[in-house]
């Protein structure tokens, strides 16, 4: 989720609210982390329309790549959490039965309780990953829309 919300040094919403492109360009030049912003401002300052459109689209594609780079991680983490929970629960049952010579109903009930506890912790991890995935998608969408607003605001041909 952090990567989706920090794909660029500055949030495009901040850029879209600014009125002076030269001021933004100067600020980006002094910020070593603002590589995408510098490239975008340079593209917007290009005088040839066809070149400007191509360079701006390149920067929007770069932003999309940055935003999508780690997009599948929360889904993978959810799968790992669920699978690990079932695997660990099976190991709890297996080890509990293997370590005891006699199997009683109390032992089985205790092992089932322990196995379900492990599964519920795995499901809690899965639920967290699902929420992180949803929030990352929302943040990604908001950044993309804000970047489009920046381009519309500062593109000299409207």
Image (cartoon, helix red, strand yellow):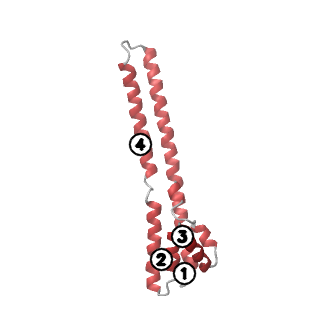
Decide which of tag 1 and tag 4 comes sooner along the chain: 4
Decide which of tag 1 and tag 2 comes sooner along the chain: 2
Quadrant into which the C terminus falls: bottom right
Q: Position of residue 76 (x, y in %)?
A: 41, 48
* Most foreground residue, 77 or 131: 77
- Asked if the residue under mark 4 is in contact with the one under mark 1, i.e. CB atoms within 8 Å, the reply is no
Q: How many residues crowd mark 3 within 10 Å: few (<14), some (14–19), many (20+)?
A: many
Position of residue 45 in the picture relative to residue 61 (left or right):
right
- Give the label on residue 56, or none: 2
Q: In this picture, is 41 found above or below 6?
A: below
The residues tagged by marks 3 and 1 sit, at their Cα atoms, a distance apart of 12 Å
- Give the label on residue 155, or none: 1
Q: Position of residue 21 (x, y in %)?
A: 59, 79
Decide which of tag 2 and tag 3 comes sooner along the chain: 2
Q: How many residues crowd mark 4 within 10 Å: few (<14), some (14–19), many (20+)?
A: some
Decide which of tag 4 and tag 3 comes sooner along the chain: 4
- Asked if the residue under mark 2 is in contact with the one under mark 1, i.e. CB atoms within 8 Å, the reply is yes
* Most foreground residue, 89 or 99: 99
Identify the residue under disc 4. 80
Identify the residue under disc 3. 147
Residue at left offset 43%, top offset 39%:
82
């Amino acid at each position: 989720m952090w990567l989706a919300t920090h794909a660029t040094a500055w949030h495009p919403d901040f850029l879209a609210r600014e009125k002076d492109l030269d001021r933004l360009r100067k600020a980006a030049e002094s910020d070593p982390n603002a590589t995408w912003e510098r490239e975008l401002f340079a593209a917007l300052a290009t005088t040839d329309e066809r070149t400007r459109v191509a360079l701006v689209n390149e920067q929007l594609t770069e932003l999309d790549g940055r935003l999508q780079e780690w997009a599948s991680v929360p889904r993978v983490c959810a799968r790992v959490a669920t699978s690990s929970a079932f695997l660990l629960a099976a190991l709890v049952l297996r080890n509990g039965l293997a370590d005891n010579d006699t199997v009683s109903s109390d032992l089985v009930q205790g092992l089932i309780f322990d196995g379900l506890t492990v599964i519920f912790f795995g499901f809690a991890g899965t639920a967290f990953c699902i929420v992180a995935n949803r929030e990352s998608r929302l943040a990604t969408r908001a950044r993309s829309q804000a970047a489009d607003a920046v381009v519309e605001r500062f593109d000299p041909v409207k």
